[in-house]
Amino acid sequence: MPDIHIPKLEEHGRGHSTLKVLLEVLLISTGVFLGLAGEQYRETARHREIAHEALQRFRTEIIANRQAVAAVKDYHVQLRTQLHAAFEADAKHEQFRDVNMKGIQPASLDRTAWDLALAQQSLAYIDTDLGMKSRRSTTPRTASRLCRAS
């Protein structure tokens, strides 16, 4: 059976051992710090990517909503003119025969991008002022403002 030699700590000297322990602690601390810094960088990059994707979806949705409003705007302007004329004529006891109404035809506005951003919590990674402007542009009230502005 072979002899097993177990070194005793007293053999290596106290000062040398303390320096070695401090060096190991320093190397381990540096490794942990670098690992945490790398993880934080990766997480920040992911948050930036999520915010960018949400903004792209907002942009696409806003363009689609504007097109939906523009598609029915002319009908509503024409109907408004006809109704004003009919109400004036009604005051003179005439009929509403000149009003060409084909239903209400509301603009169908999409809110999917906003709802998805809320569900994914990606709004936390978007600039606050920009997020509020995006929110205002996805409401039905904005559609009426777009109609009046055009």
Image: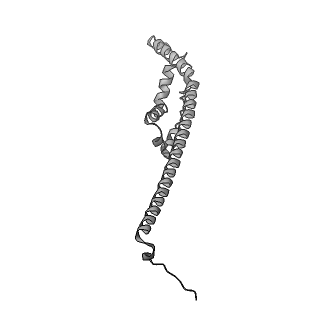
Expressed as whole percent of the image width and height from the top left, the position of residue 95 reads 51, 15
Q: Residue at x 58, y 25 (%)?
A: 71
Q: Nearer the viewer, residue 22 or 61?
A: 22
> Which part of the image, by quadrant, shows the N terminus?
bottom right
Question: Relative to residue 23, is residue 61 depicted above or below?
Answer: above
Q: Residue at x 47, y 54 (%)?
A: 33
User: What number of labels is visible?
Assistant: 0
Q: Quick check: 57 left or right of 132? A: right
Colouring method of the image: one colour
Q: Residue at x 52, y 16 (%)?
A: 82
Most extreme residue toward the top, as rendered?
92
Expressed as whole percent of the image width and height from the top left, the position of residue 3 reads 55, 86
Expressed as whole percent of the image width and height from the top left, the position of residue 142 reads 47, 28
Q: Nearer the viewer, residue 41 or 73?
A: 41
Q: Nearer the viewer, residue 111 or 8?
A: 8
Give the quarter of the image for residue 2. Answer: bottom right
Question: Relative to residue 48, is residue 5 depicted above or below?
Answer: below
Most extreme residue toward the bottom, as rendered?
1
Expressed as whole percent of the image width and height from the top left, the position of residue 5 reads 52, 82
